[in-house]
Amino acid sequence: MPGEKASAAGEALLRRLRRLVGRAATVTGRDRKQLLALIDDFETTRRGLVKECAEIEGEMRQASVRATAIGTYLRNSQAHRGKRHN
């Protein structure tokens, strides 16, 4: 299921972000190479999280459209049977 894969990927990215924050706490301002590598890792992780957010937003939008379609179908089926609807 796509939602489960996205959730697992998102969790992995969040765990990576936590590790990066821990690593950032130990880096001194004098170690330029390590700081540049850390910044690059943060940026890569951020891009991954933004991508996951966009995918989740798309899934939510699709679920909303489906729910609206189901509601419309239900109202139309009740109208054809002569039942009252709200």
Image: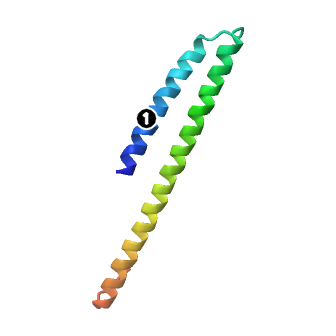
Q: Provide residue 13's location: percent of width, then percent of height.
A: 49, 33
Q: Residue at x 29, y 87 (%)?
A: 83
Which one is in front, 71 or 66? 66
Q: Is residue 79 above or below residue 12?
A: below
Q: How crowded is mark 1: few (under 14 residues within 10 Å), some or many (20 or more)?
A: few
Q: In this view, does 23 lie above or below 41?
A: above
Which one is in front, 15 or 32? 32
The quarter of the displayed image where residue 66 is located: bottom left
**76 sits to left or right of 54:** left
The secondary element bearing badge 1 is classed as helix
Q: Provide residue 12's location: percent of width, then percent of height.
A: 44, 32
Quadrant into which the C terminus falls: bottom left
Which one is in front, 61 or 38? 38
Q: Name the residue under label 1.
A: 11
Residue type highlighted by circle 1: Glu
Q: Residue at x 33, y 78 (%)?
A: 74
Q: Residue at x 51, y 44 (%)?
A: 52
